[in-house]
Image: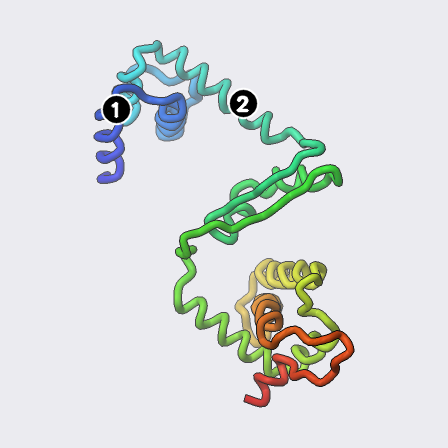
Amino acid sequence: MRLRSRRVADIARQESVSDEQVEAALVDLALEKNRRLLDLTTDDVAFSEVARTTLSKRGEPLADLAARVREALIQKIENGSHAHENTRFLHTEPHHDDLMLGYLPNIVRNVRSASNVHHFVTLTSGFTAVTNQYMLQQIGYLRRFLNRPECAALYSGGYFDQDNREGRNRDIWQYLDGLAANKPPVGWSSSKRGTSKSSATPLAAYSRPPRPRHSLTHTRPCQRRAAA
């Protein structure tokens, strides 16, 4: 209620409102009234303080505004369904799962063409809704993984090399398979193994300085953890 009152107060202070604000007000009203946009009435608008305040700044008939919003929504859906060619994409997100949750179907549609180039970047201030308890849990999984023979075997096989994209993808799918199983993570589950291997990758890159390719006398991070 407080957020709605603040929203109304902000709109009331504006000299004019944008098309985006009109769209948000009418879409919210249509959902609240369970009506089509074109079926909204002036009585419906009077019922909603947000819609009433927003539309009072436009001075246009409700029918015209509703029709314009409807056409804009249709255009957005059609634009999102269009597959591009010879296009470079920069996908940004504030949190590590926003792209997947936000518009994964559109990404999948446009990665199918080999003529497109995609860059994915997580841009955040540092707050990603990941709690300290979650991070401690992941570190616990990682410590357990570093003591397992599987870790040493994967390291010796080059699994944690920075250019091993197949390995990184495998970590993600292993984690998702564990979630899809919809079972309590009892024991050393698939999701735990996936997240642990993913956490071990940057550790392997920074755990020791680069050495010549012919040098075989180095300590592996998995062995270091076991020795510690």
Q: Colour mode? A: rainbow
Q: Nearer the viewer, residue 131 or 44?
A: 131
Task: Give, as a three-letter code, the residue at label 1.
Answer: Gln
Residue 14: give its label: 1
Q: Eyeballing the image, is 214 above or below 101?
A: below
Q: Quadrant of residue 6?
A: top left
Q: What residue sits 56% from the left and 47% below the top?
A: 100
In percent of width and height, residue 128 lies at 43, 55
* Mark 1 closeness class: few <14, some 14–19, many ≥20 residues within 10 Å: few
Q: Quadrant of residue 197?
A: bottom right
Q: In this image, 96 relative to 55: left or right?
A: right
Tell me which numbered mark, 2 or 1, is placed earlier along the sequence: 1
Q: Eyeballing the image, is 73 above or below 174?
A: above
Label 2 sits on a secondary structure element that is helix
In percent of width and height, residue 77 lies at 56, 28
Residue 27: give its label: none
Q: CA distance from mark 2 to mark 1?
A: 28 Å
* Mark 2 closeness class: few <14, some 14–19, many ≥20 residues within 10 Å: few
Furthest-bottom residue in this view: 227
In percent of width and height, residue 48 lies at 27, 25
Task: Give, as a three-letter code, the residue at label 2.
Answer: Ile
Residue 74: give its label: 2
The reply to whether callout 2 and callout 1 are in contact (CB within 8 Å) is no
Quadrant including the N terminus = top left
Q: Quadrant of residue 222?
A: bottom right
Q: In this image, 37 relative to 143: left or right?
A: left
